[in-house]
Image: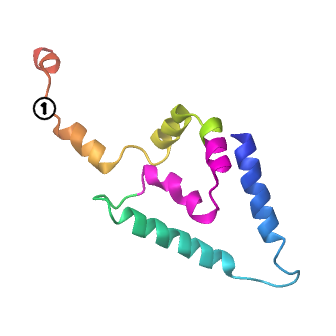
Amino acid sequence: MAKFSTRILAHVEQEAAKVPENVIWLASSDIIESVFGKDKSFTAKGPLKEIGKLVLAIPVFVCNLSTELIREAMETVRMIDVEDWIDKHPGKSMLSRRRQALKAPTSDTQTA
């Protein structure tokens, strides 16, 4: 994962170097607005309008995907780490919590 994040940070540094010295650009807010706009249109197709697992797709909107980049990401980030991060940060989705609350009791819980 360190190799992947190092490449991302190097890319950000390379892009930041393009800004002339002593000039203030508001491009970052434009980029952020664009990224969240893309995320909004992407998630609008789904039934839930909350920040959940799909928040991890946001970096895809700001980079050029290549087979090599996808391979590196798949090889360096373990699914168990992603699931752990999701549990700690956005947590269970509203739909998941609703399913848990409305789940019919099993025979094990009825006899207990």
- Answer with left or right where residue 47 lies relative to residue 62: left
**Which image quadrant: the C terminus?**
top left
Callout 1 amino acid:
Ala
Quarter of the figure that contains the N terminus: top right
Q: Nearer the viewer, residue 54 or 108?
A: 54
Residue 104 figure quarter: top left
Q: Please, is residue 16 above or below residue 78 in the view? A: below
At x 62% / y 57%, what residue is drawn?
A: 65
**Outermost residue, right side:** 21
Residue 89, above or below 57: above
Please tell me whether residue 66 belongs to the stretch shown in magenta: yes
Q: Secondary structure at mark 1?
A: loop
Q: Position of residue 36 (x, y in %)?
A: 50, 69
Q: Residue at x 67, y 42 (%)?
A: 72
Look at the image and give the residue range highlighted in magenta.
51-73
On the image, numbered disc 1 is attached to which residue?
Answer: 104
Q: Is residue 70 magenta?
A: yes
- Percent across and percent down for residue 52 are 42, 52
Q: Nearer the viewer, residue 42 or 48?
A: 42
Question: Would you say 64 lies left or right of 20 here?
Answer: left
